Amino acid sequence: MRRKFIGVAAMYCLGLLAGSLAPRTAAAQQYLLGGSGELGSGIEGGPPGAPAFSLARLRLRVALDVRVDEFPADIYAVGMLIELTPHSAFGFDVRYARRLGLKFEVNAGGVAYIAPESLFGPSAGLKYRMPLSATTHVTLGPEANVFVIGSDLPSGTIIWQVLVQAGFHADL
């Protein structure tokens, strides 16, 4: 009986030892999602025969962004653009953003309007982030767009915009 008990105890100890030495599964990278909405307007210029500066179109941007938990300062975003006044238009933008500390974020990418006419070009901006909670904040900052190709672009010119955007961002 004693021999049987020692055998069972030894098997149990070996099972515990084997279980503690077994490889554990590694945790994979986690994708962190965010959503935002922004309104923006400012000044624009460029078309020949037009005043040097004019009021830029009022624009609504609704966007989703993604970052990896290991590199939370690197953000990739895609947004839908809707121009509200003076004419309606629809487009999108794609951008890479980089957080500079807790309050600032810089971004660069491309912007495209595809309906009713097309405009394409590079974009760059800066955002100041005002926290409301750990996962939400209000954003405010300038953005510059330069439209270099498209069917709505007058021949031999470019259109530029300098906008001020105000919005809201939440981690999803």
Image: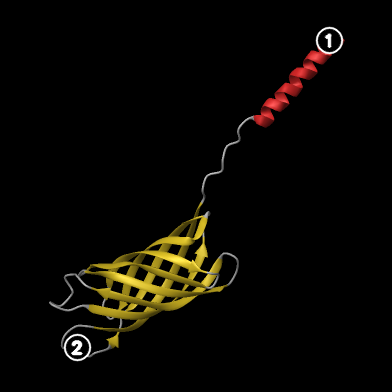
Disc 2 element: loop
In the displayed structure image, the side of residue 104 where residue 107 appears, left or right: left
Mark 2 crowd level (few <14, some 14–19, many ≥20, 10 Å Cα): few
Badge 1 amino acid: Arg
- Separation (CA) of disc 2 from disc 1: 101 Å
Which of the two discs, 2 and 1, labels the residue nearer the N terminus?
1
Helix, strand or loop for disc 1: helix
Q: Position of residue 146 (x, y in %)?
A: 27, 75
The residue that disc 2 covers is 50
Q: Position of residue 157 (x, y in %)?
A: 17, 79
Q: Residue at x 66, y 30 (%)?
A: 21
Instruction: Look at label 2 and name its amino acid.
Output: Ala
> What is the quadrant of residue 85 in the picture?
bottom left
Give the side of residue 44 with respect to residue 63, left or right.
Answer: left
- Residue at position x 57%, y 64% from top? 135
Q: Nearer the viewer, residue 60 or 52?
A: 52
